[in-house]
Image: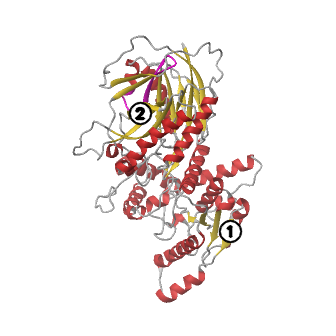
Amino acid sequence: MHRLRLALNQIDATVGDLHGNADAVVHRTREAAERGAHLVAFPEMVLTGYPVEDLALRSSFVEASRSALVALAARLADEGLGDLPVVVGYLDRSSTAQPRYGQPAGAPQNAAAVLHGGEVALSFAKHHLPNYGVFDEYRYFVPGDTMPVIRVRGVDVALAICEDLWQEGGRVPAARAAGAGLLLSVNASPYEREKDDTRLELVRRRAQEAGCTTAYVAMTGGQDELVFDGDTIVVDAQGEVLARAPQFEETQLLLDLDLPAAVAGAPAGTTGDGLRVDRVVLSEEPVADPGPAEYPGTTAPPLDDDEELYRALVTGLRAYVRKNGFRSVLIGLSGGIDSALTAALAVDALGAEHVYGVSMPSKYSSEHSRDDAAELARRTGLHYRTVSIAPMFDAYMGELSLTGLAEENLQSRLRGTTLMALSNQEGQIVLAPGNKSELAVGYSTLYGDSVGAYGPIKDVYKSAVFRLARWRNKVAAERGETPPIPENSVTKPPSAELRPGQVDTDSLPDYDVLDAVLARYVDQDQGLDEILAAGFDAETVTRVLKLVDNAEYKRRQYPPGTKISAKGFGKDRRLPVTSRWRESG
């Protein structure tokens, strides 16, 4: 057995920031070198950030990525780090693909490279290209057809990229065929609820299939609507966990591995899956007298479900605000649970000094709701003011004489206009506090409560909003801190307060029932008959499905927001606005 000290860098990258991302690679590589690492790895497309979407189709961006990779290799050598192999994800293009119908122009590739000795010692492209959910990689990339293997300190290390592990066949069995002692996969796998358990079982199974220790290094941070939770994992050939990094944290996971020595005359040629073995020897000599493992591996304690979800929402909001160059956020505070949770998330993500809240009461706003908004501000320390919309409302009504729903929605739109005016004047971006339940059934006002640059709880069902609020308050109490969300905001019946005595259940089923139906229809794509077979009331289900189908045009106009489910509104779920098909009949 040979010793290999592996440095897995779970870091956040920003799309398009080639210089900043390269700086992060150099910084972490230097840290790994100082700690005696023999092989350093970074996430999928770390040099360009991920996902680059249609930037992959711009030849100028592809060439900038390729040039940045070459410059990074030279820089590592110039800074005395050239002897340390570094695996870096980047955007490349195929040098052999011929232009043809159905292939992305320029044949871009989701690629990774091994940098060593000031040069690109080996490069390879992702073999399996995902084409589901938020992934459109068939649109953007052409696949790779090699089985890359590098020899480091006398150990053969097979390399893969993300989906190469999620799909059957390809590089996992090829790693076994190539006689690898370690399978290293670089990843940018977006967060979803409960995906950490799925991911662990996947890595365990693939390690057993590859017949070798398997290391899965992942990205953390956020990009637009996506959140990356990290959760870097190393398991042995039997699937036992050797090390696991914490979720939602930038970190370097260092681990001493005792791995099989590369065999003489290791297999070459083409594997059974049609992949050509591309083998590069970087260093044959094993580590001399390694002694006891200095870094035997650490395993971060798992997060409970509510903490994991809350941290994902905080991470997504923080990334969107900071990476887009904004300084502060503005929230309309109604005293209700949605704006209260949104404000708590914003304070945790950005600090209270960067969060501004505005109460905008009308004549229908209850005194307790005004008090709850003020109490939230007191508890969290965010900036707070009151701007009454009553004079504006009276002026509009005097001119238009609106009634019914038009009168109700006018109040919401006046609040939206007020928020955008303050945003333009003072520079904060507006956060839209709508939740997934409301968006699903169209229980939101266009150009009113849908106003905003980002929707932090856009993918959170209402029942989960209540649960997260209770969890956040409980954690604060356990820490001896003031719970941020007033108890009355959690316990009172939800209401838009646009007419006297209004509550949400006037228009919608109880949220526990509504969310259960929505989870089946929206998240699982179940039809009417399947949902009814689960025991739900037929009239309720028919009404909910009709509301969902009729609200597609509203959802198209809602701002982006953090995705935490397997199927969020947006890129995950793409239905036509104009359609006469109705699941409800």
Image coordinates for residue 261, horizontal then vertical, percent: 49, 13
Residue farthest toward the bottom in the current orientation of the protein: 398
Image coordinates for residue 25, horizontal then vertical, percent: 54, 39
Residue farthest toward the front in the current orientation of the protein: 78
Image coordinates for residue 492, horizontal then vertical, percent: 63, 62
| Residue drawn at x 53%, y 74% as measured from the top left | 417
Q: Quick check: 370 above or below 70?
A: below
Q: Is residue 524 visible?
A: no
Nearer the observer, 449 or 537? 449
| Residue drawn at x 46%, y 77% as measured from the top left | 406
| Residue 507 magenta | no
* Image quarter (top left, top right, bottom left or bottom right) of the C terminus: bottom left
For marks 2 and 1, give the CA distance: 48 Å
Tell me the tag on residue 166: 2
| Residue drawn at x 42%, y 44% as measured from the top left | 65
Q: Quick check: 577 above or below 116?
A: below
How crowded pointer 2 is (Cα within 10 Å; few <14, some 14-19, many 20+) is rated as some
Circle 1 is placed at which residue position? 384
- Relative placement, left or right, of 554 versus 309 is left
Residue 102 lies in quadrant: top left
How crowded pointer 1 is (Cα within 10 Å; few <14, some 14-19, many 20+) is rated as some
- Relative placement, left or right, of 526 versus 295 is left
Image coordinates for residue 276, horizontal then vertical, percent: 32, 24
Give the residue type that dot 2 points to: Trp
Residue farthest toward the top in the current orientation of the protein: 264
Give the residue type that dot 1 points to: Tyr
Judging from the image, what secondary structure is the residue with disc 1 in? strand
Query: Which contiguous range is marked in magenta?
Result: 151-171
